[in-house]
Amino acid sequence: MERKITLVSVGKVEKKIKEALIQPLKEEFQCPVDTRKGLDIPSQAFSEERKQYLAPSFLNKLRFSFHPEGEEKVLGITGVDLYVPQLNFVFGQAEFGGHFALISLERLHPCFYGEPEDEKLFQKRAEKEAVHELGHAFGLEHCSEPECVMYFSNSLRDTDRKSHSFCQRCRSLLDKSG
Ligand SMILES: [Zn+2]
Ligand SMILES: [Zn+2]
């Protein structure tokens, strides 16, 4: 089965960042990367109490809106802050070995932490999160190699340290999948 990745914005997302992700994703996954018309933020996702959005509602909306087959993966990209019930926030979420993955850009901006905005750093972070969540969709688990993009990021310090690429072991697992 041919691999394919489709990028979809959910809610308002700068076109620039979607476009910036295309080339790195093509290189990491060695497959075509397309963009599709964006979706609205799922209406039930907002938590008034937490002022955040429930990540699984976004995955559900993607599932409802797209019907990928074979090795096609759909990556949702949103600008709003995501959570799951047991965690303060998530950078993203994915169906393990499934079709859908999701990233939030909100916490990848240096200005979220009161630091000066840095477009390059922001793009690098988005790239790593996108490769990481898509890696899960392609069936990869977390990796203990701190340099590997599949290393679990507990904080942005982990994200900034790791590379945007797979270690040899993850790369060969990825090559065997699909
Ligand atoms: Zn992960
Ligand atoms: Zn690895």
Image (cartoon, helix red, strand yellow):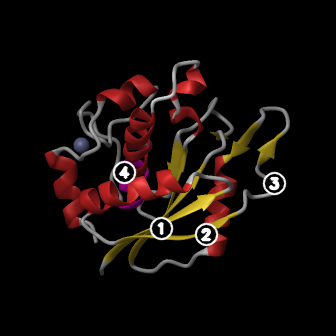
Q: Quadrant of ligand 1?
A: top left
Position in image of residue 106 (x %, y %): 59, 37
Q: Which residue is mark 3?
A: 44
**Quadrant in which the N terminus is drawn:** bottom left
At a point 35% along the width and 58% down the height, the residue shown is 139
| Mark 3 / mark 2, whichever is N-terminal | 3
Spatial CA span between label 4 and label 1: 14 Å
Which secondary structure is most common in the magenta stretch?
A: helix
Spatial CA span between label 3 and label 2: 15 Å
Q: Amino acid at mark 2?
A: Arg
Residues at badges 1 and 2 in contact (C-beta under 8 Å)? yes
Callout 1: CB less than 8 Å from ligand 1: no
Q: Which residues are magenta?
A: 131-138
Spatial CA span between label 2 and label 4: 20 Å
Position in image of residue 95 (x %, y %): 50, 58
At a point 25% along the width and 39% down the height, the residue shown is 148
Q: Amino acid at mark 1?
A: His
Q: Which mark is residue 99?
A: 1
Q: Amino acid at mark 4?
A: Val
| Mark 4 / mark 1, whichever is N-terminal | 1
Q: Which residue is mark 2?
A: 63
| Mark 2 / mark 4, whichever is N-terminal | 2
Residues at badges 4 and 1 in contact (C-beta under 8 Å)? no
Q: Which residue is mark 4?
A: 131
| Mark 1 / mark 2, whichever is N-terminal | 2
Callout 3: CB less than 8 Å from ligand 1: no
